Amino acid sequence: MSSIQGSLAKDRLGVPSVVFFVMSAAAPLTVVAGVVTTGYATTQITGVPFAFIAIAVTLAIFSVGYVAMSRHITNAGAFYTYVANGLGRPLGVGAAWAALLAYNALQLGLYGIIGSAVSEAIKLPPFNVANPPQWWAIALIAWALVAILGVLRVDVNGKVLAVLLCAEILITLIYAGASIAKPADGTISFDTLLPGNLFVAGFGAVLVFTFLGFTGFESAVVFSEESKNPRRTIAMATYAAVVIIGLVYAVSSWAMSLGTGPANIVAESQDKQVGLLFILAGGRLPEIFVQIGMMLFATSVLAAMISFHNTVARYTFALGRERVFPSIMSTTGRRSGAPIAGSLVQSFIGLVVIVVYALFKLDPIVQLFFWVGTAGGFGVLVLVALTSIAVIAFFARNPNGENVFRRIIAPFVASVLLAVVVFFACRTSTCSSASRPIPTCTGCAGPSRPPSRRSRSSASCGRSSCACPSPTSTRRSVSARTA
């Protein structure tokens, strides 16, 4: 049963649940295995760990004004609501469309990688599936699971994400701890954490890569209407997410450089790419930890899909309630309080995309995850920068209740810093070639060199276009290192 209630279920989410939604969208294990190694490999800059710290500080400063505004406005529309209240409804509507396109792009792009991630995981023990299903079959299973969860109570989704997120963060930290305990050079070096190793020619590209790792941190306010004590919950969840994500990324990327030796991290990332994380772990830990990591790599993608689906559904609900969309879009479940209409629309779009890509035999990695995914990430970056300006404008008219640091200083500093990141994003291929995202190998579900036209139709790892090791080659490399 459903009804047009005009409101979501109240008091369903506490701080931990909101943090789980936010951090699941960031997909920590996927970022550490893919974005970090790609950042090292493509930019050849060793200051990636410090870049994560710099972006975390920037987003923490942004969050000061962001959560201050959330204390005055509680609305699932997030970017739309903030930009409309700060810069006017016309810009707000534009931001709403941009947000929907961006989050849909992020969610849809993940359907392109989930098939590859799962097929790689089930080739390993205890599954040992020699011939895994086609990517679209796995994507459809994931789609059905996400669609079902999307119409259930939001706290049910939160519990599922809690389990998946805790598992992937735990294995990521275990991998990091192993490299720190057994550094390649025999000593612990802090070279990659030095600012001087970041601020060199081409550092703007590193900032863009690292920001993409935080995508989703801003979504806490989307769940404000369903939170217990929104004024406190959203603020704490946003700050906690930024700090935890930043620390996990900085420590993991630094530990990876210890595992190879700071002088070798670029070359090793170019050679091993996404396999590097698992090879380093396999040389220091029992093989079972590598197998668990590969499986959690797949569930990391699934968790991000669930989180982005919930975000898109709530944006659609908010826009239906504001009559930007037809009012039927504000339909919520009578018992679950979930945004039924928004969830069903997003599920329908996902189904259409999977079917179209399967029927026309389009490359799910290059043409879905590759092109569509990071276009969404760039859209979120622009929206965050625009929202920071909207916060300043809002408090210029409504100064009561917040001090000058929250109203003006922090939002202004954040606006300048985010404008710098957007500027550099537009100077990189991320913007100049229609937000070209990180290339990914279908065999290992991780970043690789961009495939040639001839090889884009390849659906298996190990061909000439792929720089990622297969599970077999990864195990051989682990054995060789151990020996």
Image (cartoon, grey):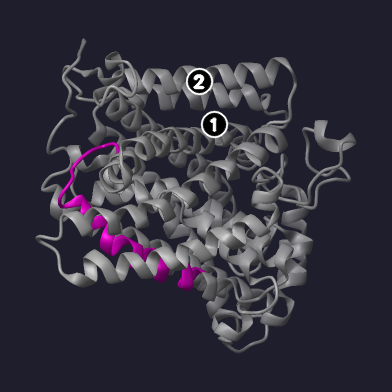
Q: Residue 271 placed where, x, y %? A: 79, 62
Left or right, residue 2 beside residue 425: left
Left or right: 399 in relation to 343: left
Give the residue displayed 71% in from the left and 48% down from the top.
471
Q: Name the residue at 41% across, 68% down.
A: 58
The correct choice, above or below, for 369 with respect to 215 in the image is above
Would you identify the image quadrant in which residue 423 lies?
A: bottom right
Dot 1 corresponds to which residue? 108
Q: Position of residue 246 (x, y in %)?
A: 43, 66
- Report whether 61 appears left or right of 301: left
Q: Amino acid at mark 1?
A: Leu
- Number of residue marks: 2
Q: Quadrant of the C terminus?
A: bottom right
Q: Which residues are magenta?
A: 52-77
Which numbered tag is attached to residue 46? none
Counting other residues with Cα less than 10 Å from the Cα at mark 1, is it few (<14), some (14-19), or many (20 or more)?
A: many
For the N terminus, which image quadrant? top left
Residue shown at 22% from the left, 18% from the top: 333
Q: CA distance from mark 1 to mark 2?
A: 8 Å
Q: Which residue is mark 2?
A: 349
Q: Is residue 405 magenta?
A: no
Q: Residues within 10 Å of mark 2 (few under 14, many from 20)?
A: few
Q: Tell me whether the residue at label 1 lies in contact with that at label 2, contact meaning CB atoms closer than 8 angstroms.
A: yes
